[in-house]
Image: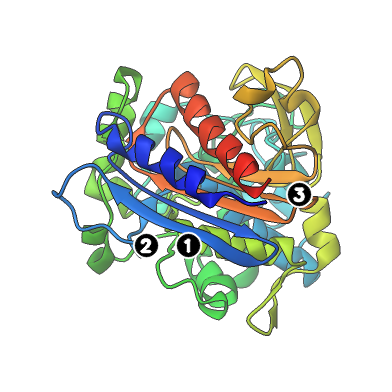
Amino acid sequence: MANYESLQNTFDLLVADRSQTPYAQLVVYKDGERVVNLAGKSDAAFSLDQNTPFLTFSVSKAFTACAILHLLEQGKIELDAPIAGYWPQFAYGGKETATIRHALTHQAGVPAPHLNRQILLWPFWSLVTWDLARTKAVYPPGTQTAYHLVNFGFILGEVVRRVSGLPIDQYLQKHFFLPLGLQNTWMRIPKSELKRSPKVFPASDDMRTSATLFNLRRTRRALIPAAGLHSTAHDLALFFQMLLDGGRANGHTFLKPETISMATSSQNEGYDAYVHYDMNWGFGFIIGGGSFRQGADPTKLTLGYGSSTATFSAMGMGTCMVWADRQKNIVTAFTCNGMLGNEGVNQRWATISNAVWDAVG
């Protein structure tokens, strides 16, 4: 029998620790019904509720991937077509053979070269994509996997723009966010809404530089399709519930079930040369099971001890997490502004995920 009171207690304990999780939200769906909807804070300095949008960092990648999948279903792009077929200038410096599939699975050859220089260009779409087009591949596309930290979004976002005629933030707003009823979700947050979003907080020393960078107004307002999504746990959960429901919600069909099944299944599993450990990648999603859990203590799995290859997720640097499990029909979305390093955030995610698995029984 479900015991959501224990999950409330776990959430309350996390939020009570002001040094790690100042502001947070948690939403859980079970069998299509919302069973948990929490918002909490450790001080009164900020007005927080279930509608407060958080910066979700790399959770963004799942949403950007869905824009690509939408174009794929319309026959406007092909998975194994060269990126340069849609963006001719990209055919430079060894990137000529990079395909849409390579970009979706972090194998396009440009993980994060010249990142420090590129940061200055983030607020200027035409400049950052021009610079990326003129960047040489670090390795031949398709020969190894290396997490494309922000270039995942710049590559796929530019493909969306060139194929559809819309910037990816507008494409997602038109085809997903508005018809799905996501009222507090933006790939590029409007200037008027930014004041409602809490600043990120370095909950560990190794996050100070990242927190400073992403608290800059010009960074927050930039179109960064791999790391700029602002959303709530409520909206993230609704989006993943739509995926779990085969792409249908609110009387709309957003994606076909077979497309979602493909994207949320393992497409590229093994060692990732950028993060330096094994990953299990779908198309923009992190898949549970497989090498993602080999040798791990089940209680320390970020997606929880009940996770498997039927679990698909998206995670944001040091902060947010959303996952869905097909076998148990569960969706979990957690947002917060306290940025932890890898070990700390993995433990926090595992604590939440395991509490969810415990609560649903």
Q: CA distance from mark 1 to mark 2?
A: 7 Å
Q: Is residue 192 above or below residue 138?
A: below
User: Which residue is at the front of the view, 103 or 25?
Assistant: 25
Q: Is residue 116 above or below residue 127?
A: above
Kind of residue at badge 2: Gln
Instruction: Kindly state the secondary structure of the residue where label 2 is placed.
Output: loop
Residue beneath disc 1: 234
Determine if residue 298 is in view: yes
Instruction: Kindly state the secondary structure of the residue where label 3 is placed.
Output: loop
Please report the residue visible at 28 percent of the width from the left and 55 percent of the height from the top.
197
The image shows residue 124 at horizontal and vertical percentages of 36, 51
Callout 1 touching callout 2 (CB < 8 Å): yes
Give the side of residue 227 with respect to residue 327, left or right: left
The image shows residue 26 at horizontal and vertical percentages of 46, 51
Mark positioned earlier in the residue sequence (3 or 1): 1
Q: Residue furthest left?
A: 45
Residue beneath disc 3: 264
Mark positioned earlier in the residue sequence (2 or 3): 2
Q: Quadrant of residue 247?
A: bottom right
Q: CA distance from mark 3 to mark 1?
A: 21 Å
Give the side of residue 246 with respect to residue 241, left or right: right
The image shows residue 152 at horizontal and vertical percentages of 59, 43
Q: CA distance from mark 2 to mark 3?
A: 27 Å
Give the side of residue 300 with respect to residue 207, left or right: right
User: Which residue is at the front of the view, 150 or 262?
Assistant: 262
Q: Is residue 99 above or below residue 183?
A: above
Residue beneath disc 2: 50
**Residue 158 disc label:** none
Callout 2 touching callout 3 (CB < 8 Å): no
Please report the residue visible at 63 percent of the width from the left and 36 percent of the height from the top.
303
